[in-house]
Image (cartoon, rainbow, N blue to C red):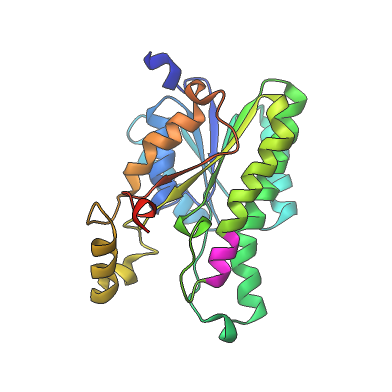
Amino acid sequence: MTHLFDLSGRTALITGSARGIGFALAEGLATAGASVILNGTRADTVTEATGRLTSKGLKALGRAFDVTDPQAVADAFAQWDRDGVQIDIVVNNAGIQFRKPLVELELADWQRVIDTNLTSAFIVAKEAARRMIARGTGGKIINIGSLTSESARATVGAYTAAKGGIKMLTRAMSAEWAASDIQANAIGPGYILTDMNQPLVENAAFDAWVKSSNPSHRWGKPEELVGTAVYLSSAASSYVNGQIIYVDGGWLAVL
């Protein structure tokens, strides 16, 4: 049965993986046998994160590029083609947050959040899927959504729009690519203890709200997303397509 979850011989690209959720997912997929490619915008942090994995005997490479830049993404995939690197799994994890009421939100900030959290997933997945389709060997696309793929909160309108878009983009990918044996699914994390969320953790009122509104009465940990990511990357999910799986401690169940 364990062979269903074995990722040996597969190569996974995880965007935004120098830290936080992305790094945890990269480490988890590598532990399951995959060769992983870490990504971020800063070469130094990508190199450091890659070294943390290789020092544990895991198979990892790093490449710094901006996932919102179509040419940079195309160049990265072209280089992997030349190097004989075949991307079998893509995890679109790169994301940013920007908190401000919609009536005060500048268009440039709206666009930056949409580009990073939603458009980049389209750009990266398109490059990967074109190659998966041409090879005829199928593949896996995992998009990282959010509780805001399903439910809105004040001051994060752009993020909510982007993550809602991730849910529907995932379904669109499934509609077009399922016949090519590409499974496109999403993960919707709940409130997770990450660097990006640290200001919220340190906000006593918000921290209390998270713990009181969640049936589990706690924040989630990045590593608690790994099992779902391995499942969606593996043969165990070969007939699962167009879905978003929420890993939220039960938060959405009690809204």
Q: In which quadrant of the rendered view does residue 80 lie?
A: top right
Is residue 199 left or right of 159 when viewed as pictured? left
The structure residue drawn at horizontal position 71% and vertical position 32%, both measured from the top left corner, is 177
- Secondary structure mainly formed by the magenta segment: helix
Q: Quadrant for the C terminus, please.
A: bottom left
| Residue 89 on image: x %, y % | 57, 33
The structure residue drawn at horizontal position 72% and vertical position 25%, both measured from the top left corner, is 180
Query: Would residue 87 be visible to someone looking at this image?
Result: no
| Residue 219 on image: x %, y % | 28, 56
89 up-or-down from 161: above or below: above
Query: Would residue 100 be visible to someone looking at this image?
Result: yes
| Residue 133 on image: x %, y % | 74, 28
109 up-or-down from 144: above or below: below
The structure residue drawn at horizontal position 60% and vertical position 29%, both measured from the top left corner, is 88
Q: Is residue 104 or residue 14 the one in the foreground?
A: 104
Specify start and end residues of the magenta stretch as a single range.
157-162
The structure residue drawn at horizontal position 51% and vertical position 64%, both measured from the top left corner, is 96
Q: In which quadrant of the rendered view does residue 204 lie?
A: bottom left
233 in magenta: no
Is residue 234 left or right of 72 when viewed as pictured? left
